[in-house]
Image: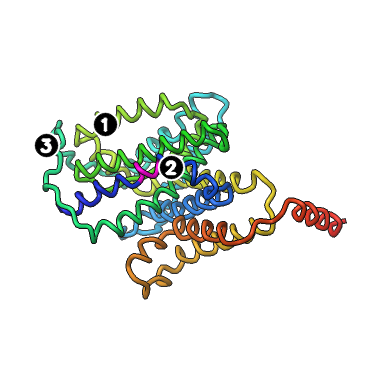
Amino acid sequence: MAMLFGVNFVAALVPVIVSRFIEPLKKIFTPIITGSVIALIGISLIKVSVINWCGGEKAEDFASMSNIALGAGTLGVIVLLSCAKNRWLRLSSVVVGIAVGCIAAGLSGQFHLHGLGDTLFRLPTLFPFGFQFNSAIFLPVALVSLVCILEAVGDLTANSLISQQSVDDCAFRNRLKGGILADGVSCMVAAMLCAFPNTTFAQNNGVIQMTGVASRYVGRYIGVILILLGLFPPVGELLRQIPAPVLGGATMVMFGCVVAAGIRIITQTPLSRRDVLIVGLAFGAGLGVESVPAFLSHFPPIVGDLFGSAATSGGLVAIALNLILPQEQAATKSLRSQDDRAESV
């Protein structure tokens, strides 16, 4: 454990360093790449949402009608409140939906509160297992950290787009720098507290899309609240006991909004035939690996770590194609668009 968290701590320096060199990388993170990554993140998360909706992978009553009804009820409440004219109802749609789902689960016997622990307050200990480092283990973890940066760029781009901010100016690049830097710092803190590395989470973009609240001040307040709640173990235990179907129904809307945000980024500019080829192969690689994980079973473990998820495999394929395939000339694009219009006539 000491070596595991020690390596994670050092690997967290990778995004910290990369955050200072966003300018040279801006040609790599084009709208078709970031949009494809965001959409693939949302699609892969929808699978998690559906599994929770059915009760969780290890549930004995997996996909039972009671679980389906509970998740559907939670989803329905959130959708109805999101469409309400009252601003406060829209803002609280997710919280109210989860609360209604928990009440319904309790009335139907699907929600049972267990012991919340005897310790009401606890301060964390830094590196309780000690600190060790192994360079052989560090290399693959560092590579995975680089891949996570790709996902973070996609999430941060979607966040800016949903928040009605520009995604092609100096302010946006500064937001990318700050976001990736914060990712690295949070991973360092997580390693010190014996938690696994974390990264930006696309679900929050879905929350912004549904509530219309994108203020960074709200994020700061929530961050402070989460830190305080982390000092009280019973609160975390209470949240952990929320029924899986309730979480599945609630996250279905959010993850769907993430997919929509990715598609919006891809289509914000007209797509050339080259762009369509890149997007198509990125989705093919991402969804292919997600659908058939055994595809990578005979490759070295490091390949599985790099290409094991839809977002990373699709994103890496998109980046490679964007660097390899020749750019189309503007005149060629114009002639092709004229030919396409002529053919349609």
**Dot 3: few (<14), some (14–19), or many (≥20) neighbours within 10 Å?**
few
- Residue drawn at 40 percent across, 62 percent down: 308
Place of residue 96 in the rendered image (x, y in percent of width and height, measured from the top left): 42, 33
Residue with the mark numbered 3: 118
Q: Is residue 20 magenta?
A: no
Helix, strand or loop at label 1? It is helix
- Residue drawn at 35 percent across, 55 percent down: 144
Numbered disc in front, either 3 or 1: 1
Say whether disc 2 or disc 1 marks the residue closer to the N-terminus.
2
Numbered disc in front, either 2 or 3: 2
Residue 227: assigned label:
1
Residue with the mark numbered 2: 21
**Quarter of the picture holding the C terminus:** bottom right
Helix, strand or loop at label 3? It is loop
> Above or below — where is 331 with respect to 81?
below
What range of the chain is rendered magenta?
Answer: 15-19
Place of residue 179 in the rendered image (x, y in percent of width and height, measured from the top left): 41, 37
Q: How far is disc 3 from disc 1 in space, using C-alphas?
A: 20 Å
Q: Is residue 13 visible?
A: yes
Q: Is residue 16 magenta?
A: yes
**Amino acid type, residue under disc 2 in the picture:** Phe
- Principal SS element in the magenta part? helix
**Amino acid type, residue under disc 3 in the picture:** Asp
